[in-house]
Structures are given as structure tokens and as C-alpha cells.
Image (tube, rainbow, N blue to C red):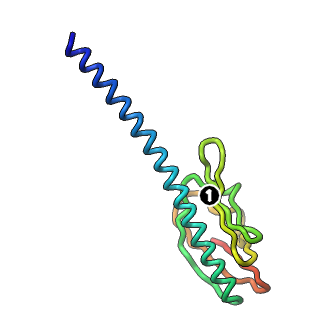
Amino acid sequence: MEYLVLTGFMMLILSVLLVAAYLKIGQSQKHFDIDSAERAINELKRAADFVYIHGHPTKLTISIYLPMDMDPDHSYIENNTINIAMRVGDSYTDVWRRTRGQVGWGGSGNMPSTEGYYVFVVESTGSEGISIST
């Protein structure tokens, strides 16, 4: 009987530790995704500012990793803002940066909707405008 109680108690402790580890791993993934979005935004901003400063006909091609929980319907590139909306539970958190010049999405449709590496083309359209596309 003592062995059965001891085994049950150890199983209870083990299951609590496993649940806590699972929750921490989920939190780590969210932090990783938001950090990836911040790196992507910073790269796009840096490229857009470079093209703006150097003027027409400057063109840059950069490779950027877009994270898993990005929502392309709420993400945008317009005016002086580059924004990536990240799903966090039932809501969104925006990761955004302001650029020096007017930027706009030059591709067809919205930003890419799946996780992965994408090649973005950042180019001057003249008259202080910058087009970003995949």
C-alpha cells in the first residue's frame, strides 16, 4: 500500500512538472515569433530608409523570415508605416516601425500568409515613394 501511494504521489508531481514545462514552451514560441517579427520589420525599415536616402533608381533585394502567427489581413505597408500583426491568443499585437519616406505594398494582394523566408524587393518609385513587394 505504501508503494502504491508513493508511486501515485510521484506521478502527480511528474504530471505537474510536465504541464508547467509545456506552458513555458508555448510562451517561448510566442516570444520567438514576436522577436522574429521585430527583426523582419527592422530589416524592411532599414532597407526602405536606405532606398529613401539614396533616391531614385535605388533598388534592394533582401531575404526576410516571416513568423508563423503573422496575420496578413491585419498587416500592412502604407504611408510611413510597416506593420506586422501577430496573433496572440484571441487578439493581435502589432509590431511596427515608421520609415523616413512614403512606403507602399507593390505586390499583388496582401503580404505573404505562411511562415518562411521570403525575398522582398525594396525600390524607389521616384517622387520620394518606395515600393516593397515579394
Amino acid type assigned to the residue bearing label 1 in the image: Ser
Q: Residue at x 55, y 56 (%)?
A: 34
63 vs 13, left or right, is right
100 or 123, which is in the foreground?
Answer: 100
Residue 33 horizontal/vertical position (percent): 52, 55
The C terminus, quarter of image: bottom right
Give the residue number, with chain letter if any, for mark 1: 113
Is residue 41 shown above or below 16? below
What is the quadrant of the N terminus in the image? top left
Percent coordinates x, y for residue 95 in the rendering = 63, 59
Please identify the quarter of the rendering in which residue 57 is found. bottom right
Place residue 76 in its image quadrant: bottom right
Q: Position of residue 15 (x, y in %)?
A: 36, 29
27 lies above or below 131: above
Number of marks in the image?
1
Q: Secondary structure at mark 1?
A: loop
Residue at x 65%, y 79% (from the top left corner):
49
Residue 36 relative to residue 126: left or right: left
Residue 102 or residue 65, whichever sits in front = 102
The one of 99 and 60 positioned closer to us in this rendering? 99
Residue 59 place in picture, x, y as percent = 63, 84
Mark 1 crowd level (few <14, some 14–19, many ≥20, 10 Å Cα): some
> Residue at point 72% right, 70% down?
105
Q: Residue furthest right?
A: 127
- Residue positioned 56% across, 76% down in the render: 62
Name above or below for residue 20 compared with residue 133: above
